[in-house]
Image: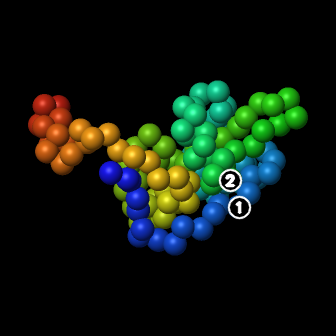
Amino acid sequence: MLLTFTFFANTMLPAAADMKGLLSLLAEHGGSIISSNDLHPDLIAQARASNRMYVDENSLGYVWEPPFAGRFPMTENEFELFERCYPIEVELPADLTFENLMKRMNRSGR
C-alpha cells in the first residue's frame, strides 16, 4: 500500500540553495531547522526531493522541517504543505490497517 495524497497540486518548494533559503522557509511557514544528522535517511531523501535541505562548504547538512513534523497535518494548509514537503511515496507496513489502528487507539484510552 502506498501513502499518497492528491488533494492539492504537488508543486515544489522554492529551492533552499543556501541558509538564506532555509531561513526564508522558516519565516514563511514556521517549523524548525535541524541537522540532517538527526534524521533518518528516508526523511533526508524527502527533504532533498522537496528542496528543504542545504549542505554547507563543510559538508554539514541542514533541513527545514515544517511545523507539523512528527504528527499528521490537521488543516487544509498543512495538507498542501505536507504534499510539497514529502513528495516521495512511501510504502506503508502491511499491518497498518484501520482495524489495527482502532485497536491501538482503544488500548491507549483515546
The image shows a total of numbered marks equal to: 2
Q: Please tell me the numbered disc located at residue 51.
A: 2
Crowdedness of circle 1 by 10 Å Cα count: few (<14), some, many (20+)? few
Percent of width and height locating residue 64: 64, 45
In three-dimensional space, the C-alpha distance between marks 1 and 2, rounded to whole angstroms, equals 7 Å
| In the foreground, 62 or 99 | 99
Which tag, 1 or 2, sits closer to the chain's start? 1
Amino acid residing under circle 2 = Asn
Indicate the secondary structure of the residue bearing disc 1. loop
Percent of width and height locating residue 108: 17, 31
Q: Which residue is mark 1?
A: 14
Q: Residue at x 39, y 46 (%)?
A: 91
| In the foreground, 1 or 82 | 1
Q: Residue at x 59, y 28 (%)?
A: 38
For the C terminus, which image quadrant? Answer: top left
Q: Is residue 108 left or right of residue 45?
A: left
The color scheme shown is: rainbow
Can I make out residue 27 in this image? Answer: no
- Quadrant for residue 60, please give it: top right
Residue at the extreme right: 57
Q: Residue at x 54, y 31 (%)?
A: 40
Q: Is residue 102 left or right of residue 54?
A: left
